[in-house]
Image (cartoon, helix red, strand yellow):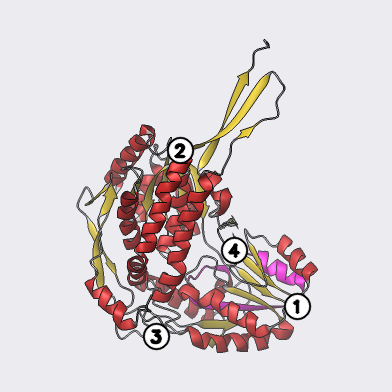
Amino acid sequence: MRQLSLADWQARSEQLRPQGRAFIQGQYCDAVKGDRFATLNPANGLPLAEVASCDEQDAQLAVGHARTAFRRGDWSTLAPAARKKVMLKLADLVELHAEELALLETLDMGKPIGDSLNVDMPAAINCLRWNAEAIDKVYGEVAPTGLDNLGLITREPLGVVAAIVPWNFPLMMACWKIAPALAAGNAVILKPSEKSPLSAIRLAALAKEAGIPDGIFQVLPGFGHTVGKALALHPDVDALAFTGSTRVGKLLTQYAGESNMKRTFMECGGKSANIVFADAGDLDKVAREAAQAIFFNQGEVCIAGSRLLVENSIREELVERIIAHAQSWQPGNPLDPASAMGAIVDATQLDGIRSHVARGIEQGARLRLGGEAVLTDGGGCYFPPTVFDEIDNRLALAREEIFGPVLAVIGFDSAEEAIAIANDSPYGLAAAVWTQNLDKALNTARRLESGQVYVNNYAGGDMTVPFGGVKQSGNGRDKSLHSLAEYSQTKTTWIELGTNA
C-alpha cells in the first residue's frame, strides 16, 4: 500500500463530509429537540461538522430501544459463536475503513495522522477481534457439591450498558468498552466526548452493516452534563463504563447511587510516576522512552509519565538527554505523516496547560524547555514539549493532571524515598521502574500503589493484561478477560438430584 503524503491527506480532508447525527434504533437521526453544536479542527480552529446535541429525551428514547432489543434476545441469547462472527465482521469493516476513521480522529482531536492510522486503528481492530474470539471460549462452572446436588454457575449479560468515553483516543477507548460489552451479549449506548465524536458516529453505521441488531448499539453525541448525566441517572441502564477525569467519575458514581445502584466501571485521572534508578542501564534508551511517555499524543494520555523521579546522581545527565530527545517531538501539522506531535484538542485545554505552566514558574519550578504555545498564527492549538526540573512533589505540577506535554522532574536519593514520593498522590493509574537489579525492580513494583507497573519500559502491555487504576484513578478494568467478566454477572442454579438410581 502506498504511503499517503501531507497533500494526499489534505485532499481527502477537503472531500470528507462527516456524519454528525445521533444513531438510534439502527438509523441516523437528529436530536429530539434539534439542538446541534459544532466540532472544530484544533489544527486551525475551523468547523468540521454540525453534531447532534442529545439530551435527556434522546437518552430516554435510546434506553427504551436498548431495553426492548436486549429483551428481544436476538443478540443477548445468540450463541457466542454467532456473536463472534458478527463482531469479527465489524473488525473487518473497521480495518477496511481505517484510513477514513483515522482521518476523522486526526481532524477531530488533533493527533498526528501517523498515530491515528498506525497506533489507534490497529488497537481498535485488535480489541474487537480479541473480544470476539474470547467470547466462545469462556466457560461456566460446576460447583464441587455432594452427590445429591448439582451447582451450576453461569454468566449472563448485564443488560443495557452506557459507555462514556474520552476525546484523547476516541475510537480505541470506545472499542475498549463496547467490544467486551457487546461480546458478552449486552445492548450498548455509546456517548462519545463532545470534543471528538465523529469516529464513534461513523462506527455506528459499520456496526449495523456488520449485522448488529437495531437497538443493540446506539451512539448519542452530546455533552456530559446533559445526555451523559441522563444516562447515568436512568433507572433502566444496568451498567455505566467511563473513562475520563476523576471529577466527572465521582459525579457519575453519585448518579449511579442516586438511581438504581447500577454497576460503575471508572477509569479516571492519573499522575504517573516514572522512576529511574542510577543502575537503570542505557540512559539514552531511558531518556528516549521517558520523552515518549510524556510527549506522545501531545501528553493527552491518562497514563502519561508526567512525574519523572530520578536518582539524583544521574538526574542532570538524564534531563539533558530528555531535552535532546524532545527536539524530535516538536508539534506540527497533524495531517503531515512526519509530525510526531499534533495539536492540543481545543482552546480550553490549551489554556489549562498554559495556566499550569505559569503557576509552576510562579511557584519556583525550574523551566528547562518549552513553556509557551507555538504555531498560533493559523488559529491552531499547539504546545511544545515542556520540561520542569527541581520539582517538589507538593507543587501543583506534581499533583494535578495537566493532560499536556509537560514533564515534572523530581530527584531522590533512595528507593524508600522514591516509593514514598510516587505513592504520595491521589492517583494510582500507572508507574514505571527502571533498574537492572531484579530484586529492586520487583520489590519497588510491589510497593507502588498503582494498577499497573512497567519495568524497564513505559506503557507496555497488550490485550491479554488488564488496564486500570487504584485510588482516585478508578476501579474498572479495560482489556483482558477481566474486562469481559465485568460486563456479565454470575448466576447460581442449585439442583436437588433424586435419590432413585
Residue 283 on image: x %, y %: 67, 84
**Which of the 4 image quadrants contains residue 498?**
top right
- To which residue does mark 2 refer? 79
Tell me the amino acid under the disc marked 4.
Gly
Residue 283 or residue 380, whichever sits in front: 283
Task: Identify the magenta region.
Answer: 399-428
* Dots 3, 1 in contact, CB < 8 A: no
Tag nearer the camera, 2 or 4: 2
Residue located at (39% from left, 39% from top): 75
With 423 as the anchor, is 3 left or right in this view? left
| Residue 413 falls inside the magenta stretch | yes
Secondary structure at numbered mark 3: loop
- To which residue does mark 4 refer? 461
Secondary structure at numbered mark 2: loop
- The residues tagged by marks 2 and 4 sit, at their Cα atoms, a distance apart of 30 Å
**Which of the 4 image quadrants contains residue 323?**
bottom right
Residue 396 showing in the rendered view: yes
Residue located at (33% from left, 77% from top): 43
- To which residue does mark 3 refer? 374
